[in-house]
Image: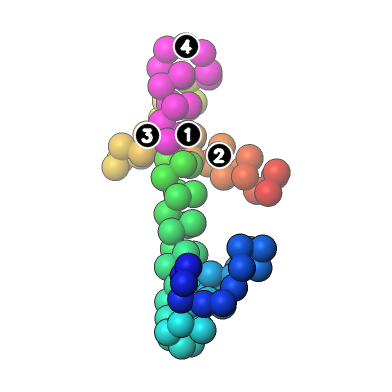
Amino acid sequence: AVGATDYSQSDWVDGHLGSVCVEIGGKWLGAWTIFAAAISNLALFEAEMSSDAFQLMGMAERGYLPKIFQTRSKYGTPTAGIIFNTIVVVAFG
């Protein structure tokens, strides 16, 4: 957006990208940009939670955590780790 708008760097705050996209391409571009950013954040969260769950499973397999974290679903996902991570995120979120 540099050069496409008259905004200075100090104008860029949280949520400003959507405003710039509306100014450049209209409401449809602003809406799609906000939608894409939301999906990107959701995917990043899911990837991080999956990674953490597999780390808990690996630690349980080596004996550092209780064996309950070794459990997997029929698809191979570490169920106990995902449930634990969800509880932690809800509790501290």
Image: 6 above or below 93: below
Residue occupying the far right of the picture? 92
Q: Can residue 69 be seen at all in this image of the molecule?
A: yes
Please, what is the three-letter code of the amino acid marked with disc 1? Answer: Asp
Choose the circle earlier in sequence order: 4 or 2: 4
Magenta highlight range: 51-66
Q: Main secondary structure of the magenta part?
A: helix
- Mark 1 lies on a secondary structure that is helix
Amino acid type at image mark 4: Gly
Count neighbours of disc 4 (C-alpha within 10 A) and say few if under 14, some if 14 to 19, many if 20 or more. Answer: few
Location of residue 92 with respect to 58 vertically, above or below: below
Q: In which image quadrant can residue 39 be found? A: bottom left
What's the mark number on residue 85? 2
Q: Which residue is mark 3?
A: 72
Work out which residue is located at the far left of the displayed protein and give it. 75
Q: What mark, if any, has residue 63 been given in the picture?
A: 4
Q: Please give the label number shown on residue 42.
A: none
Do labels 3 and 1 touch, CB within 8 Å?
Answer: no
Nearest to viewer (mark 4 / mark 1):
1
Rendered residue at 44%/27% (across/down): 55
The mark closer to the camera, 3 or 1, is: 1
Q: Quadrant of residue 92?
A: top right
| Horizontal and vertical percent position of residue 42 | 47, 57
Q: CA distance from mark 3 to mark 1?
A: 14 Å
